[in-house]
Every structure is written in C-alpha cells, then in structure tokens.
Amino acid sequence: MPTPRFAEPQGRSYDVVIVGGAVIGSSIAWFLSDHPDFDGSVLVVERDPTYEQSSTAHTNSCMRQQFSNELNIRISQYAADFVRNFRHHLGDDPEVPDIELRSFGYLYLAGDEVMAARLRANQVVQRALGVGTRIMTPEAIAAEYPFYDLDGIVCGSHNPVDEGYFDAGTMFEWLRRKARANGAEYLANEVVSIDRRDDTIVAVTLATGERIACGAVVNASGPRAVATARMAGLELPVEPRRRYTFVFDAAEPLHRDLPLTIDPSGVHVRSDGPVYMAGCAPDHDPAVAYDDFRVDDSVWEDKVWPALANRIPAFDRIKLLSRWAGHYAHNTLDQNAIVGPHHLVENFIFVNGFSGHGLQQAPAMGRGVAELITYGRYRTLDLGPLGYERVVRNEPFPETAVI
C-alpha cells in the first residue's frame, strides 16, 4: 500500500516533472514558472516534504568565487548577484526579504610549492574575471590575522568580495514559495518508475499508483540521483558520501571574523556568528546508504580538533556544541555538476552531482535549465561544458579548486 503521507496530483499530464523539490528543484521550478516565454505546467515531486535528509537541509551555506575554471566562477558570480539582489530577482515583491551575504572570504593556505603554484595560477583566471582574489605571503597573513600559526605555510589565497556565507534557508524557502504562487505544483509523493519509449520519456509513475504523462523529466534528486536515472535505464556517476559539520565556541574568541580557512590538512573552519563552524571529509570516504547519517566522533577527536588547535592556537580550548553529517551528491568523475539532457534521451535532464556546490550554484542552474527547456538551448550562460556528454567520453571537467 502507498505510504499514507503521500498526496495525489491534481492532473495526469504535465509539461515538466521535476524529481526532487530541494533547492535545485525549486530553483528550476521558480525560473520556469517565472519565465515569460514558458507557459507550460510544472510538477515538483518530493518524497520528503520536510527535507530533513536533503543536502539542502545540511548545508553550511557557503559561497565562493575561487575556482580555477571560468564557468564555475561565472556561475558563482551570478549567485552572488542573485543573493545580494534577491528581492529584485524575485520580482521586487516587498514581502520577499533581503538576504545578507557575509563576505569575509575564503582563505586557502598552501602547505607546499605545488599548492602555492596552483593558487597563483587560479588567481590569474579569477582576476581576469573581476574576482578580488589576492595572494598573500605568510607575513601579510600574520599582519592581518595574527591568530594563525603559519608554520609550514608557503602562501595564502584570499578573496573578501562576494565570498563567505549567506542565509541559504531563506533563499530556498522563497524560491519554493514563489514557484508555487506562480502555479508550479508541489506534490508530497515519490516517483517509483519512469516510462521510456525508445529515446523518449513519456511518463512517470508515483508511489500512489498514478501514471503521469510528461514532456520532460528533470532529475533534481540530489544524492539519490543515480536511482532516479536508473528508472529510465540511464547511468550516472553520482553517489552519496558523508560530510561532517562541527559547531563550537572558543574560550578565547578571536577578535575578528574568521575567514573560511582551508587548512592543508583538509579541515576547513569559519566564523558562524558568535561561534565557529568546521568541517571535513573523512579519511575513508566510501559511498553510504541514502539514510546513513551517522557521525563518526573520531573524526572530531583525531582530525578536526588537532588541525584547528595546530593552525589557530586559541582553539586549543574549545567546546563542541553540535555536530551532524550530511550527504554530498558526489560526482565520482570530477566532483562538478552534471547539467543538461542525456545524449540519447533528450527529454531526460540531469541537474546532479554538485559535490557540495549545489546551494551556490542553484540560481544559475535554475536559470539555465529553464532556458534549455523553453528554448532548447542556453541563452545567458552556456552550461554546455558541464553536460552529460563528458560522462560518456569519460572526460573530466577541468577544475582544480575542489574542497
């Protein structure tokens, strides 16, 4: 029998069915519903309307410009503009709140010459696009941020403009709210099968038994993306991997905001209001079950806290306040988004594999996929290099600035 919490759809045919209603699915739903040249119907199917296990719910809400590839930089530049001018982008509705972007920047610390050379090369690309990245000597870092122990650090890369963290929860809530106001239907249900006839998707079937005809299916199902793709007989190199977040306070708080600091150990840490937030990947990083959100406390004891105390001596005395595990939708090919149609099944559209970048890339993805569905091509920013064809060719998207 179907799960009682599931609801039935209002219709039996939609132009677009979006599988997954978290921030990526809601961004696409809003951009489609708001597009002046799109007059179709949109159904967003979300298996868990509480979003408790979604990557969106477990995000650290970060945004950065410091990538090595021009396309990723431009995607983030649009995100920064979208957040800074959120009310305007959502139609100047006076009820839409402003969203603050706390731009204290990322600070990458290079522990060897190889990483230093990479940061310098990336800065050339970033500066050419107007990003405010600066390469800092250890002496310059110490003068500005005297709380670091910089032993073994060759240089740092810091961008204090449009880089830091923002209220992603508010962005998600209002994208979803405005999409629904514009006519997109949100349904608490689950797609359990996809009907493919030769090279065309013709319908989806819901957990409650309804068969829904559709013009296109958008896979926005986060870490579950591979399961959605396989319903259509398609493969996708995406799997759920645990990422840990730890929130703590310090007996000796720092005298100023702590940039999001990426230590050579792989641990990252930043200010989060009056407290601090740290995170990392586990050293053993396998795919996990979709419902596996266990926290390995040894990651804090053996990896995170020692790295924090080593880099910031004031963090030798800290108190752990909370911790959680979330899932990256990890793209095993190159840890970058896969966006666009399948090369053979053109009305099956991927928006998957963000590997931790989904929140900051959601606005550009929503805009781009809306253009793709409406016009058959991208108009404002060509997302083609992130397309599925590179998976077929086994050619990774070139991006060296992956955390």
Image (cartoon, rainbow, N blue to C red):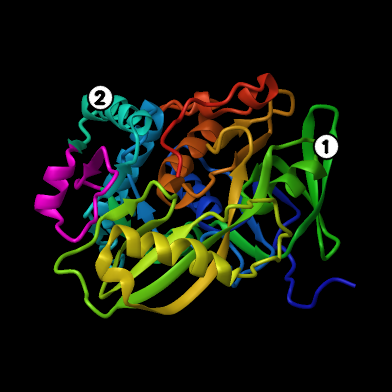
Q: Residue at x 85, y 71 (%)?
A: 2
Residue under label 1: 233
The one nearer the camera, 9 or 146, is 146
Residue 31, given in percent of the width and then of the height, sits at: 45, 46
Residue 261, given in percent of the width and then of the height, sits at: 31, 53
C-alpha separation, residue under disc 2 versus residue under disc 1: 42 Å
The one nearer the camera, 212 or 159, is 159
Q: Is residue 132 visible?
A: no
| Left or right placement of residue 84 versus residue 197 in this view | left
Callout 2 amino acid: Val
Residue under label 2: 124
| Left or right placement of residue 275 versus residue 40 in this view | left
Q: Residue at x 54, y 64 (%)?
A: 299
Q: Residue at x 44, y 52 (%)?
A: 359
> Measured along the vertical axis of the image, is residue 351 above or below residue 296?
above
Dot 1, how many residues are within 10 Å of its Cα: few (below 14), some (14-19), or many (20+)? few
Residue 310, given in percent of the width and then of the height, sits at: 33, 60
Q: Examine the image and state in which quarter residue 246 appears.
A: bottom left
